[in-house]
Image: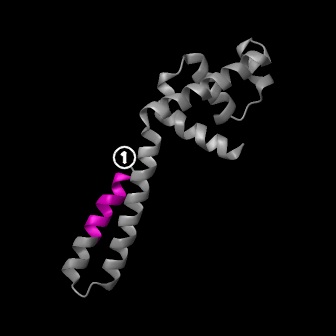
């Protein structure tokens, strides 16, 4: 369930705006606020089964968007690559004999790490 929660959370971050309002609301209550299906059903005035169906349909939609667009996978690959570059730069900085070179490498590393924050 935890892996599924992390996966759905990431997919929701990328594709949530493509869901219907009801799907977004239900997923936010279910995954974001940790409400039970029964609690969501009571708040929304629908059956527990309708909430369950909405969660499953929304999850299926999110996975479908990812299979077509691949934005999450691209993000993960880019993150892995920038992490590797940062690690290599750290090694180069620590072994640099030239202070000017070390400062420039540090600037490059900071720029790359800043990409993760955008």
The quarter of the displayed image where residue 59 is located: top right
Relative horizontal placement of residue 5, taking residue 39 as reference (left or right): left
Q: Which residue is mark 1?
A: 118
Q: Is residue 108 above or below residue 74?
A: below
Q: Judge whether residue 88 is colored magenta.
A: no
Secondary structure at badge 1 equals loop
Considering the image in quadrants, where does the N terminus appear?
A: top right
Tell me what residue is drawn at x 74 percent, y 12 percent: 46
Q: Which residues are magenta?
A: 106-116
Measured as percent of width and height from the top left, residue 2 is found at 69, 46
Compared with 59, 108 (above or below) is below
Q: Residue 108 at x, y = what percent?
A: 26, 65
- Rendered view: 34 above or below 47: below
Q: Residue at x 67, y 28 (%)?
A: 29
- Residue 55 in view (yes/no): yes
Local packing at callout 1 (Cα closer than 10 Å; few below 14, some 14-19, many 20+) is few
Single out the residue that lies furthest toward the front.
Answer: 67
Q: Residue at x 61, y 44 (%)?
A: 6
Give how far across and how far down residue 4 sits, in percent.
66, 41
Q: Give residue 3's position: percent from left, percent from top.
A: 66, 46
Query: 68 or 61, which lies in front?
Result: 68
């Amino acid at each position: 369930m935890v892996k599924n929660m992390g996966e759905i959370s990431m997919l929701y971050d990328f594709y949530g705006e493509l869901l219907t309002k009801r799907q977004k609301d239900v997923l936010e209550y279910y995954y974001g606020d940790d409400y039970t299906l029964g609690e969501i059903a009571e708040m929304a005035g629908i059956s527990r089964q309708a909430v369950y169906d909405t969660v499953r349909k929304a999850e299926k939609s999110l996975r479908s968007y990812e299979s077509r667009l691949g934005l999450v996978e691209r993000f993960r690959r880019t993150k892995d690559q920038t992490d590797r570059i940062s690690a290599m730069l750290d090694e180069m900085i620590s072994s640099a004999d030239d202070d000017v070179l070390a400062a420039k490498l540090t600037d490059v590393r900071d720029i790359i790490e800043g990409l993760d924050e955008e």
